[in-house]
Image (tube, rainbow, N blue to C red):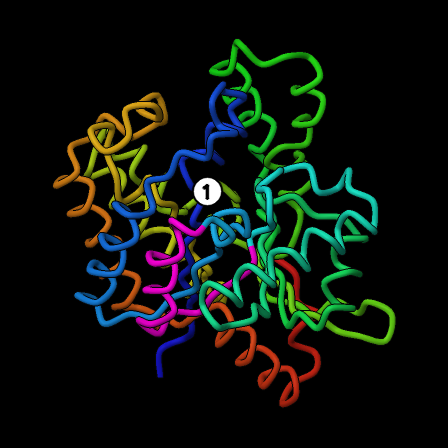
Amino acid sequence: MKPVASLSLDLDNQWSYMKTHGDAGWDEYPSYLDTVVPRALDFLADKDLCITFFIVGRDASIASNRSAIRTIADAGHEIGNHSFDHEPWLHLYSREELVNEFASTEAALIEATGKRPVGFRGPGYSLSPTVLDVLAERGYEYDCSTLPTYIAPLARAYYFLNSPEMSDEEREKRKKLFGKFSDGFRTLRPHMLEIGEREIVEIPVTTFPGVKTPIHASYLIYLSTFSESAARAYWRSALFACRVTGVEPSILLHPLDLMSGDDVPELSFFPGMSMPLERKLRLLSGFIDELRDRFDVVTMREHADRFRRSLAESPSASEVLL
């Protein structure tokens, strides 16, 4: 049997990118879901894959988005919670604010898809002990909001460099965006978090074992703008390192991995958006094919369930850190 891997897509909408970037007009909630959702579903159907879509509650609450979002659930994909307002500073929220955030998202997702989420990913990998406590209290089975990498401060500096219009107040909110250097010392393996009398599985977004550089699709596409062969070699080396070290990769997709600047000119400044769509989809297809050649690719919930079963068989499994 192949070792397990999970695949997920954070369905950040156009307005959420604009909001995080500090752009005017985000509060009119411009959307590209009618473009990217059918494209993503066709892409995944061609691969015969079911994955996890982490959906923003605000999008599910807007009537014009519900048809597109409903098709995700109808196609058999798992629905996850990606917060209501997609603010990557959940660590600043009070407990009451977090309860309202999750309750609002759950209600919107149930109305739009008929499914209640059991998994969560914080926008911008935003997490805190209070977030985890509220998740456990609300019966969530897993969280996947950690990104174990040493380069988070560099990513944040690049982000601020490309956001010159952002106010000091907005910068202050985002000062922990993408995490901190010490996050690179976190484990890459799924592990159990004990929160009071409850337990929740934490599944990190996988980075390159050892060096802890990113390997999610957006990063691979960005590398491909310099050299496709180097990006493919980097990806294959990362997958080999995962196999050798026993890491079960959890790979992250974003909508922009399936779009170009022609689809959404307002976001053309993001890395990789100048790449023609046909080339981008070809690259993404190749990356996922290589993942499937080496791993059994499942949803995040199935990944968490398999970890729980393995832990029941070998309780020491969660104590190994990389």
> Where 255 falls versus 195 (above or below)?
above
> Where 130 falls versus 12 (above or below)?
below
33 on left or right of 312: left
User: Could you tell me residue 245's position as x and y percent?
Assistant: 49, 63
Q: Which amino acid does label 1 sit on?
A: Pro
User: Could you tell me residue 266's position as x and y percent?
Assistant: 34, 23
The residue at 69%/51% (across/down) is 101
Secondary element under disc 1, as helix, strand or loop, is: loop
Q: Residue furthest bottom?
A: 313
Classify the position of the N terminus by image quarter: bottom left
Residue 20 visible to an observer of this rendering: yes
Q: In the picture, residue 270 is in which quadrant?
A: top left
Please tell me whether residue 125 belongs to the stretch shown in magenta.
no
The residue at 48%/28% (across/down) is 26
User: Could you tell me residue 39's position as x and y percent?
Assistant: 22, 52
Q: What stretch is highlighted in magenta?
A: 63-81
Circle 1 sits on which residue? 214
198 on left or right of 174: right
| Nearer to the camera, 141 or 73 | 73
User: Are there few (<14), some (14-19), or many (20+) residues within 10 Å of tag 1?
Assistant: many
| Nearer to the camera, 19 or 176 | 19
> Where 267 falls versus 161 (above or below)?
below
The residue at 20%/41% (across/down) is 280
Q: Label the magenta part by its dominant secondary structure.
A: helix
Please tell me whether residue 67 belongs to the stretch shown in magenta.
yes
The residue at 57%/40% (across/down) is 124
Residue 188 visible to an observer of this rendering: no
Classify the position of the C terminus by image quarter: bottom right
Q: Which residue lies furthest to the front in this view?
A: 63
User: Could you tell me residue 231's position as x and y percent?
Assistant: 27, 40
11 on left or right of 92: left
